[in-house]
Image (cartoon, rainbow, N blue to C red):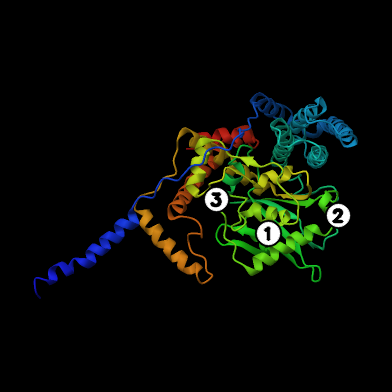
Amino acid sequence: MSKANGPQRLILPGALLAMVAALAWPAPPPRVADPPPGGQRFVWGRDSLWSALEHGFDTIRTSGCARESSIRAAVDSVDALLAALLAERTASGTPSIASLEDAFLRLAPQAASCGAVANAYIALQGRLREAIKWQSITWDLSARPVRETLYRLLYGSRAAVEEVMLQQPDSASTLTLGAPVPSATPSAASNGVVLHSGDILVSRGGYPTSALIARGNDYPGNFSHIALVHVDSATREISVIEAHIERGVAIATADQYLADKKRRVMLLRPRSDVPGIQRDPMLPHRAATTMLERARTEHIPYDFTMDYADPGRLFCSEVASAAYREHGITLWTGISTITAPGLRRWLASFGVRQFQTQEPSDLEYDPHLAVVAEWRDPSSLFDDHLDNAVTDAMLEGAERGDALEFDWYALPIARLLKGYSWAREQFGGIGPIPEGMSPAAALRNRSYNTRHAERKAALRGAVTQWATDKSYRPPYWVLVSLAREAR
C-alpha cells in the first residue's frame, strides 16, 4: 500500500469523529418569552384558616357522627344561601358570596368526621358550583377580582370536598351527577352516564407531566386533559377526539378513552340557553362532527408551543375550542397566564412558547358550560394529591433556580433517536421522541419525570409515618410541606 493511502485511512475516523461532535454539540438554551401583560399569580393567603380547619377536624373526629344533626343543620344553612343566590343575580363582591365561601369551608371538618354526611357535603358542593356558575354568566370574567372570586369558590369548594372524600373513603360516592342539562344532540350511555355529541371531557392523567400541566399556571388546577365527544346520529357510536403528545389528534372509543390512566374525569355540556345554541340546538353536534372529520382526513400534529391561535397544530384544549370557534362559540372565557420566571423557564425547555393559553382546568369556570357528572375514586384521588404536592414543591424549587439538567452524553443518543422517530413518522408510525419535540426537550422531560418519581416515593414514606402518628391522612397543605422536605 502506498503512502498516499495514509490520509485516506483517516477519512472514515475523521468523519465519524465529526458526526459524534455534531451530535454532541450542546443544545442552545431555550428562548423564554416574556410574561403576559396583566398576569399575576393567585395567592390564597389563608394559612391560618387551613391550620384551624385541621385542628377542628382533629378535635371532633373521635366524636364522629354524634354531631350528625348539627352537621346537617349546617348543610341546610348553606343551602339557604344557595337558594338566595339562585333566586336573584348579584355582583361577585357582595357579602353573601364571601359568607358562602367561609361557611362551606368551615363545614368541611365536620363532614370529614362523619361518613354519614360525606355524600351530603359532596352534593352540596355540586349545588354551590351550579349557583356560582349561574351567577357568573353576568360577571366580567376579565376582571381580576371576579376571576379570583370564581376560583376561590369553585376550586376552594372542590378542595374541601376532596379532603372529606379522603378522610371518608368508604362512604364517599365515586360518581356524582350535576343538575340535568338538556341537549338536542345525539346521545348514548357509557358507564352509567349519558353522553351527548358536543360534550367535553375534562380529565387528569396519571403522569408527572399531567400534574405539571394542571398546577403550572397562575391559577393552579386539578385537570390536565381535554377531549371532545361525538355521538353518531345513526349508530349511536361514541367517539372521543383528543390530542396526544405522542401522535397528535386521534380518535378513541369511550372504553379506550377510559382505559388510559386517569385520576379524575369531569363531563361538561354547553348550556342550552347560550345564544348560539338557542338559534341552532344541533350546533354542539356540528362542532364535534367538524373536528371528527378533520381528524379522520388529515394528520394534525401536537402543538407543543401551546399557541391556541394556531389552527395547524392542536394541543388538547384546542380540540374543543377550535371546533366550537368554527361554529361561532368562544370557549375559555378565562385565559390562563403563566408569569412565574422559574416555571416559564422550565416550560420553555419543553417547547412552550405561549404563556397566555387555554389551560384544561379553566374550562370548569366557563359560564357557557355546565357540569353534568364527575368521577373521583378515593385511591386515585390520593395519588392525584401526592402528584400535586410534589409538583408544587418542585415548582418552588424552579423559582429558586433549580434546573432540568441531563448528562451531555445522552444528547447524541437522543438526536439519533429523533432521526429514527422522524423516519417512522414518514410511514405513519410513532417513534420514541414525539413529532415536534426536540431531543433536548425530550431529555429534560425525562429528567423531570425521574425527579418527580423520586420525590413522590420519598413523600409516600413521609406520609405513612405522619398518618401513623396522627391516625388520619394528612390534608393537602401538610402534603406540600412534607413534599418540600422529601428532596
The Cα atoms of the two marked residues, 3 and 1, are separated by: 27 Å
Residue displayed at 42% across by 64% down: 419
**Residue 215 in the figure: left or right of residue 430:** right
Query: SS class of the residue under badge 1?
Result: helix
- Residue 415 in sight here: yes
Q: Amino acid at mark 3?
A: Thr
Quadrant of the frame with the N terminus: bottom left
Pointer 2 or 3: first along the chain:
2
Question: For residue 60, which quarter of the picture?
Answer: top right
Query: Mark 2 sits on what residue?
Result: 279
The Cα atoms of the two marked residues, 2 and 3, are separated by: 35 Å
Q: Position of residue 177 (x, y in %)?
A: 81, 49
Residue displayed at 76% across by 58% down: 198
Marks 3 and 1 in Cβ contact (< 8 Å): no
Residue displayed at 27% across by 63% down: 16
Question: For residue 191, which quarter of the picture?
Answer: bottom right
Q: Is residue 448 above or below residue 227?
A: above
Residue furthest toward the bottom?
1
**Residue 25 in the figure: left or right of residue 74:** left
Query: SS class of the residue under badge 3?
Result: loop
Q: Nearer the viewer, residue 416 or 470?
A: 416
How busy is the neighbourhood of tag 1: few (under 14 within 10 Å), some, or many (20 plus)?
few
Q: Determine which of the numbered discs, if any, sits on residue 258 in the image.
A: 1
Query: Mark 3 sits on what residue?
Result: 305
- Residue 62 in sight here: no
Q: Amino acid at mark 2?
A: Arg
The Cα atoms of the two marked residues, 2 and 1, are separated by: 33 Å
**Residue 371 in the figure: left or right of residue 39:** right
Q: Position of residue 19 (x, y in %)?
A: 30, 61
Residue furthest toward the right?
87
Q: Position of residue 289 (x, y in %)?
A: 74, 64
